[in-house]
Image (cartoon, rainbow, N blue to C red):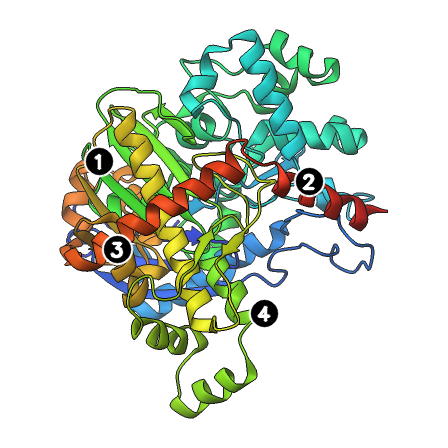
């Protein structure tokens, strides 16, 4: 085994690896000050599997979103050694590696961690593959889980705002049982990809408190009871104890040492610390220096995840969860989110961008997003006369309903593309304001808001958010904040810093008051927000079930 530098060495570095929706990225980070020395990105060869399995022409059902485990391993074998080589740092200087994943991204494996889709005879079975966070085909199961828990008065339901999401472990697991019982019974471990990738690195199964609490409904030391699960479906009774149950590890802990096999993939020294797995948004709190209570972090990308620590647990309607130690040990971590944000903007430019605008963007040498932002910024707030509902991927918070769909109200023959684009951006900001209002209504103070993720670099978007929220916004310094957060946790796991708070102070960073609101624009957005809330409640809280009926009609038509 090659010699490894001491954790206290000023030249020591750690590796952070962020497994996103379409790619994985690795960053080499200096332990003493958080300097990012090099980054490398590896796109997933199969991306998101939504229409058909690799090598198949058989269409997948609506709302399916799968991935291929080999793509995750390829990140370790490609992005990590490339980042290390670009940094110019010798491998012997690396003292630890940390990872984060989208969640809930969950997969069925054998007892030794082999994904079922890699077993003979299972490559053509959709339920043998990892289900990505935005796999929303288990909404029926999520509704059943919620209804039964409410009927029985299950105490854990309130910790999730009273609704269980189709994105989470139990709904997806129940869907597998209902639709492919052979895959379900062959599944020996049902595991978050955040924990599976750590298994691949250190050779032993671990389970982290974050995904277990938010996505696995683990509260107060217990999973949902066998009796409750049997009431859902008698065949589901042993789901938690047989396929999920495992001692939980604290964030920032050491899951194990890098195995010889993983060292060969990554080019890193065998035996270095492998940090306990984590979720992309939650791990980013350390990078953005938002670990302290009351500091809301919005990680804005294809979706947005809102996370914040508090000193006590409170029941916030429509939250994704409040979990003890879920972001940092010793505190209660709150999570909320929006299932579509950047995805919505991308949908518009990919599908509805006019040819004449494309020619104009090409002549100016700008992207579609830049052109639409420029044109929209020239219009006064409210001049487009539109309100949109940001539900193109359903609603994660506060309605927790992925059978909802997007709406644009106020269209006329004078409506221009930039008007709709601006309304979609505003809708996502209104969605975030709805979440902050839910926190305030539950007596959980949000003292400040920090932005991270790819959209923090979009001045048009951040300006709208500051005006809609009517508060100054801080911005995380790192463009690779999740990967940096994973690196920070690796430094703690390796013993270079005593805890996550200390490591965050030394290695993280954010620019305070980077975007400030305009009082005049904020006042107009107050009026627009009232209209948004009317439509939000009408379509989302029972005033009309039109969106649900449309979804049901679509699904029946696609599956005939």
In this rendering, the label closer to the viewer, 2 or 4: 2
Closer to the camera in the image, 261 or 481: 481
Q: CA distance from mark 1 to mark 2?
A: 36 Å
Q: Residues within 10 Å of mark 1 (few under 14, many from 20)?
A: some
Q: Describe the element under mark 3 as helix, strand or loop.
A: helix
Label whose residue precedes the other's in the sequence (1 or 4): 4
Q: CA distance from mark 2 to mark 4?
A: 24 Å
In this rendering, the label closer to the viewer, 3 or 1: 3
Q: Quickly name the residue at label 4.
A: 351
Q: Which mark is residue 549?
A: 2
Q: Quickly name the residue at label 3.
A: 524
* 389 horizontally vs 186: left or right: left
Question: What x and y, as percent, mark residue 231?
Answer: 68, 11
Q: Quickly name the residue at label 1.
A: 446
In this rendering, the label closer to the viewer, 3 or 2: 3
Question: What x and y, as percent, mark residue 65?
Answer: 63, 49
Q: Residue at x 50, y 83 (%)?
A: 358
Closer to the camera in the image, 405 or 156: 405
């Amino acid at each position: 085994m090659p010699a490894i530098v001491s954790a206290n060495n000023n030249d020591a570095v750690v590796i952070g690896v962020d497994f996103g929706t379409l790619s994985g990225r690795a960053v080499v980070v200096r332990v003493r000050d958080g300097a990012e020395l090099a980054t490398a990105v590896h796109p997933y060869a199969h991306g998101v599997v939504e229409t058909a399995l690799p090598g198949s022409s058989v269409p997948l059902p609506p709302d399916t979103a799968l991935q291929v485990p080999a793509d995750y391993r390829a990140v370790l074998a490609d992005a990590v050694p490339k980042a290390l080589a670009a940094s110019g740092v010798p491998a012997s200087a690396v003292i630890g590696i940390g990872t984060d994943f989208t969640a809930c991204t969950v997969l069925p494996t054998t007892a030794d961690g082999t994904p079922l889709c890699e077993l003979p005879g299972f490559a053509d079975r959709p339920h043998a593959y990892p289900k990505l966070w935005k796999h929303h085909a288990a909404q029926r199961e999520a509704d059943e889980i919620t209804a039964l828990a409410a009927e029985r008065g299950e105490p854990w339901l309130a910790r999730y705002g009273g609704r269980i999401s189709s994105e989470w472990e139990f709904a997806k697991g129940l869907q597998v049982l209902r639709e492919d019982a052979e895959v379900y019974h062959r599944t020996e471990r049902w595991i978050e990809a955040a924990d599976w990738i750590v298994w691949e690195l250190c050779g032993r199964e671990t389970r982290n408190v974050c995904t277990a609490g938010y996505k696995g409904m683990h509260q107060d030391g217990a999973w949902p009871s066998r009796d409750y699960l049997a009431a859902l479906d008698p065949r589901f009774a042993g789901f938690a104890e047989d396929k999920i149950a495992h001692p939980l590890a604290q964030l920032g802990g050491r899951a194990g040492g890098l195995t010889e096999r993983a060292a060969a993939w990554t080019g890193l020294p065998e035996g270095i610390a492998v940090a306990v797995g984590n979720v992309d948004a939650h791990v980013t709190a350390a990078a953005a220096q938002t670990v302290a209570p009351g500091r809301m972090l919005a990680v804005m990308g294809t979706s947005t995840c809102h996370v914040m620590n508090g000193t006590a647990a409170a029941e916030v309607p429509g939250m994704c969860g409040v979990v003890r130690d879920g972001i940092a040990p010793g505190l209660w971590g709150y999570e909320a989110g929006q299932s579509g944000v950047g995805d919505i903007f991308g949908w518009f430019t990919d599908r509805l961008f006019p040819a004449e605008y494309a020619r104009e963007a090409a002549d100016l040498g700008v992207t579609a997003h830049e052109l639409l932002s420029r044109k929209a910024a020239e219009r006064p707030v409210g001049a487009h006369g539109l309100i949109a509902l940001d539900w193109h991927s359903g609603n994660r918070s506060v309605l927790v309903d992925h059978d909802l769909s997007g709406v644009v109200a106020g269209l006329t023959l004078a409506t221009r593309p930039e008007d709709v684009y601006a309304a979609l951006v505003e809708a996502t900001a209104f969605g975030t304001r709805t979440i902050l209002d839910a926190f305030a209504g539950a007596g959980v103070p949000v003292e400040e808001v920090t932005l991270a993720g790819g959209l923090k670099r979009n001045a048009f978007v951040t300006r709208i958010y500051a005006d809609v929220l009517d508060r100054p916004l801080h911005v995380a310094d790192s463009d690779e904040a999740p990967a940096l957060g994973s690196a920070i946790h690796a430094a703690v796991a390796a013993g270079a810093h005593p805890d996550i708070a200390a490591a965050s102070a030394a290695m993280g960073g954010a620019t305070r008051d980077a975007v400030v609101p305009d009082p005049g624009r904020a006042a107009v957005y107050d009026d627009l927000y009232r209209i948004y809330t009317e439509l939000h409640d009408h379509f989302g809280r029972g005033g009309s079930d039109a969106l649900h009926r449309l979804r049901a009609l679509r699904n029946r038509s696609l599956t005939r």
